[in-house]
Image: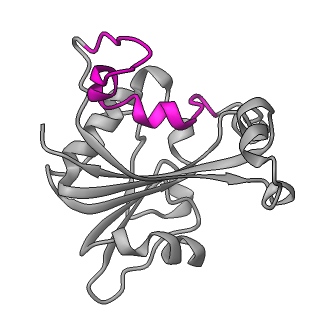
Amino acid sequence: MRDIHKVLYGMYFGKRNLYLGCGMDKAESVIRQEWVNLDYFPKVKPDVCHDINKLPLPFDDGTFNCIFSCHTMEHVRRENFPYIMADIHRILAPKGWFVAITPHGLSNVAWGISQHHMMFNEMTWGGIDPRTYEKEGSYGHMDTEGLPYKKWNIARMNLVPFPEFENDPELEWKSKHLHNIINEIHVVMQREED
């Protein structure tokens, strides 16, 4: 795990944590912080080798205080996304945290890799909680009948621009109207009870 991610999101890590899609960048357990590294590829020698598109994830209910995912969720097949998020909800402890970093949907990083199946923006994360569509002023209705949507509290959402746009005074306008301005989207969500 990169040091910058520990600095930015270490406050959400708990006693027992899962690094979902760890790759070669595995997290190491330290005092009062155990990590389980999961990845699809055996060559990276994860603690658990498993394809996240195959459910259920191989953990008991409420196992983890935090699940961290960096550039993994975009590899989830779109039709599996609500089911995977429900299973992440299941294996999180009550009030547990899910921290996800993905390419932003308007960047070439998101679209340029053939193994990317999901594109993420601010609406993607808000849309996995059915209460989003019940709010006054909502732009529509989503038929969640039969889908395993769970309740989440989005605690933080950060749009990370490409370096050349970091101090751009027109960043907000450009990020909504142009491609390749925002590089990543970082989201921190807390599991809520149904």
162 part of magenta stretch: no
Q: Quadrant of the C terminus?
A: top left
**Residue at the right extreme?**
164
Seen in the picture, residue 10 relative to 142 is either above or below; the reply is below
Which residue shows up at 56% across the image and 59% down it?
Answer: 23
**155 with respect to 100 (left or right):** left
Q: In this view, does 122 lie to the left or right of 81?
A: right
Left or right, 181 with respect to 187, comes to right
The location of residue 143, given as percent across then percent down, is: 30, 9
The residue shown at (24%, 58%) is 96
The quarter holding residue 36 reads: bottom left
Question: Which range is magenta?
Answer: 116-144
Q: Is the magenta stretch mostly helix, strand or loop?
A: loop
The spot of residue 132 in percent (x, y) is 33, 28
Question: Closest to the observer: 131 or 74?
Answer: 131
Say if the magenta span includes residue 137.
yes
Residue 77, relative to residue 44: is it above or below?
above
The answer to which quarter of the image holds residue 176 is top right
Q: Tell me where residue 8 appears, x and y as whole percent.
A: 51, 71
